[in-house]
Amino acid sequence: MSDQFFLFLALGIYFALMLLIGALAFKRANTHEGYMLAGRGLPPWVAALSAGASDMSGWLIMGLPGAIYATGLIEGWIAVGLLIGSYLNWRLVAPRLRAYSEVSRNSITIPSFFENRTRDRSHLLRSISSVIILVFFTLYASSGMVAGGKFFESAFEGEYLVGMLLVTAVTLAYTVFGGFLGASLTDVVQGLMMVVALIVVPVVAIITIGGWGETTSIIDAVGAGNLSLTGGGALTGGAVALVIISGLAWGLGYFGQPHIIVRFMALRSPQEAASARRIGTTWQFLSLAGAVVSGLVGIAYFSKFGGAPSDPETIVLLMSQVLLHPLVAGLVLAAVLAAIMSTLSSQLIVCSSALVEDLYRIMRKTPPSERVLVVLGRVGVLAVAAVAALLAINPNDSVLGLVSFAWAGFGAAFGPIVLLSLYWRKLTNWGALAGMIVGAVTVFVWKAFDTGLYELLPGFAAALLAAVIVSLATKREDAEIQDEFTTTMNLVLRKPADR
């Protein structure tokens, strides 16, 4: 049998499994809350693995290894920042957001939580945050489709457009029918596939090269700074500082990513965030370490055996095809698709909730029926996917470039507001609105000037400052807000045995 047969067999098995999970989840996605939030019934391991898989996207197996391969270990500061940020997100945000979102009028989306938390009767906060979600997630989803097209080009020497549309179509199939639960359960399988692929490929490559010692010698010989977290003297002190600060700043983005923190809202209880944190952090460490090592090993492998890729973001794909049995290589390729599709499905669900729950419902004077909301949710998924696909037809940026901008946009616009909502009683609707707008605008402006400093950091700082200043200027006493804040803290501090 030909190698192509095994590759297509592995992909066929993977696609069939994803569609089966989506079909099984369809039975539990017959209510609006069930479709958008799985009825707040996710076990810790599902929440942890689905949060990790939806977080990482195609950049974990393509973007990050490609950056390490092209630049060296200095790009590893992104991984360090993400690991720290993910841990703090589970520690600081998860238990409080799970409790507060339910206490505050059972909010099932981030925009509705902001509105209910601050008692914003103007609906401006909810509307604008929904628009921000739609803008940045359309770009983010587009990056996943770009990664799918690149994957198809590299793995099968096929056409970019065919690959992009195929990945999008399969993702849409299980997301439209399975909703949030379907996306979460497929994320679990996809997350496990990703971490196994990122361990197997570099380990086999190291053995093929001749061991870790031989591998590091070649890496160092290719470029003196490849194994240095500071660039090995290739950069000035100021430039190194910018790279390190920018890399660590990626961690700030976690607090404002709707497709990640919505998993916190779907947990069965606030207390289960602790076990989810341990599972999620372990998965995160193994995945990021595997991606970084894959990029470094790629330097040694292609230096020794030749055949270096024209696109650095495809190194994991190429190594898997050369080093592994075609069926195993096909499963690795499926893991790449898993990384892409897990994030894409989550983004489409969040965009759909923004359209239906946060824009459509506030414009309706009479509440729509549950059946209408579920149907509109599915239509919303299709609409956002269509726009993202149009943007992905002619890609003009790298996967990492597209993801970094969208990540910064969400981190700066929502991150400070999420933290202040959970930890500061004095946050007002006008303060939250000011912080959100300032954060988003700062990201766009800073990106245009290209200073070398990751736009997330100044955007986050500006949003935090604006939210605090405006909140203090517009503060008002609201007994209901204070009671909810106190109730939430009591729920978070309650021990499992007290429930």
Image (cartoon, rainbow, N blue to C red):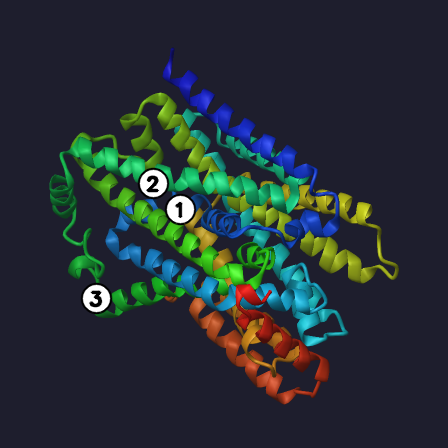
Evaluate if marks 2 and 1 touch, with contact meaning CB atoms under 8 Å apart.
yes
Amino acid type of the residue that numbered disc 3 sits on in the rendered structure: Thr
Measuring from the top left, give residue 69's x and y in whole percent.
Answer: 27, 45
Left or right of residue 225, residue 446 in this image = right
Q: Which residue is mark 3?
A: 236
Secondary structure, mark 3, is loop
Q: Any mark on residue 198, and which?
A: 2
**Residue at x-position 31% and y-position 40%:** 199
| Quarter of image, res 207 | top left
Decide: few, some or many residues near mark 1? Use Cα within 10 Å; few <14, some 14-19, many ≥20: many
> In the image shown, does 473 or 442 lie closer to the viewer?
473
Q: State whether residue 450 appears in this view.
A: no
Number of the front mark, 3 or 1: 1
Number of the front mark, 2 or 1: 2
Secondary structure, mark 1, is loop
User: Hey, which residue is sitting farthest front in the picture?
Assistant: 497
The CA distance from mark 3 to mark 2 is 32 Å
From the viewer's perspective, is residue 340 above or below residue 408?
Answer: above
Measuring from the top left, give residue 41's x and y in whole percent.
Answer: 62, 51
Amino acid type of the residue that numbered disc 1 sits on in the rendered structure: Leu
**Residue at x-position 76% and y-position 73%:** 122
From the viewer's perspective, is residue 184 above or below residue 441?
Answer: above
